[in-house]
Image (tube, rainbow, N blue to C red):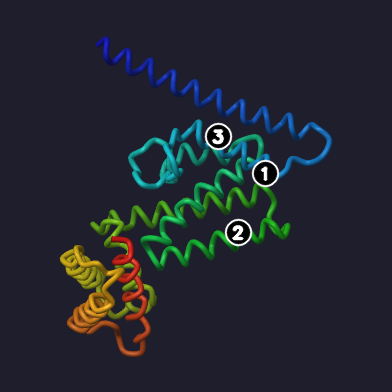
Amino acid sequence: MRQAFSLSKSLASLAERREEAYFETVRSVLVKIERPGAISLKEINAQVNELLKQSVQSEGVVNLFADVDKEFNLFNTAFMEEISKMPEKNLSIELLKKLIAEQVRTYKRTNIVKSHQFSEMLDKIVKSYLNGLLTNEEVIAELMKMAQDIANAHQNGNAMGLTDEELAFYDALTQPGAVKDVYSNDQLIAITKELTEELRKSRTVDWEKKESARAGMRRMVKRLLKKYKYPPEGMEDAVQTVINQCEMWSGNQ
């Protein structure tokens, strides 16, 4: 009972400190806005970084997406809603951009298809905003929708019984949308899991330094795909996307 009370008290104290950090950050921004001249991007970034540091309590490089069980991350709807409703819209926009950009950077190391897809999406939103085509409220809505798209993609992988690693190979296999008209989803998942398992068996190979090993990996991938009669006729380029994903995987082992 005493331990439970102590834990509850600690959590309440932590929540109070986060709330204090939030209001102090907003107060500082508003004070700067009231002064002559517009608040600079450098000042906004400094406030954003301080708010992230206080709220997320990260150590070293900020990575909000490594563990979806952590309290503050892109998949925490309540946290994202709180950011979107901040009274200072410039700060809200910068926070959302930083959170989403962090996930995009993660994809650049893990998932070649989603990296391209979400990078283009974020660039389009930001360019539209900078060109005056979106208001503060509209860009926040677009960023929130993108965050939800990313969260949904993660949840869809879980629903299919795929790890993030396996989902990256599944995305590569299904990059041409028409592939799903030729194979059932069960077949695509079977290819994904076998491909992932074959690569895992070679995890000890020094892919970076042994081009012969990398060439062998490419042959193995092509042989496995041929076993499943992949790709369908007329979609030969799809193989290269799968090869590229495998090389990205091997380069990060």
Mark toward the start of the polypeptide (2 vs 1): 1
Of discs 2 and 3, which sits in the foreground? 3
Residue furthest out toward the left: 201
**31, above or below 94, in the image:** above
Quadrant placement of the N terminus? top left
Residue under numbered circle 2: 125
**Residue 157 or residue 107, whichever sits in front:** 107
Residue under numbered circle 1: 42
Residue under numbered circle 3: 51
Give the residue type at disc 3. Answer: Leu
**16, above or below 142, in the image:** above
**184, above or below 226, in the image:** above
Side of 193 relative to 242 (left or right): left
**Residue 72 or residue 252, whichever sits in front:** 252
Give the residue type at disc 1. Answer: Lys
Of discs 1 and 3, which sits in the foreground? 1
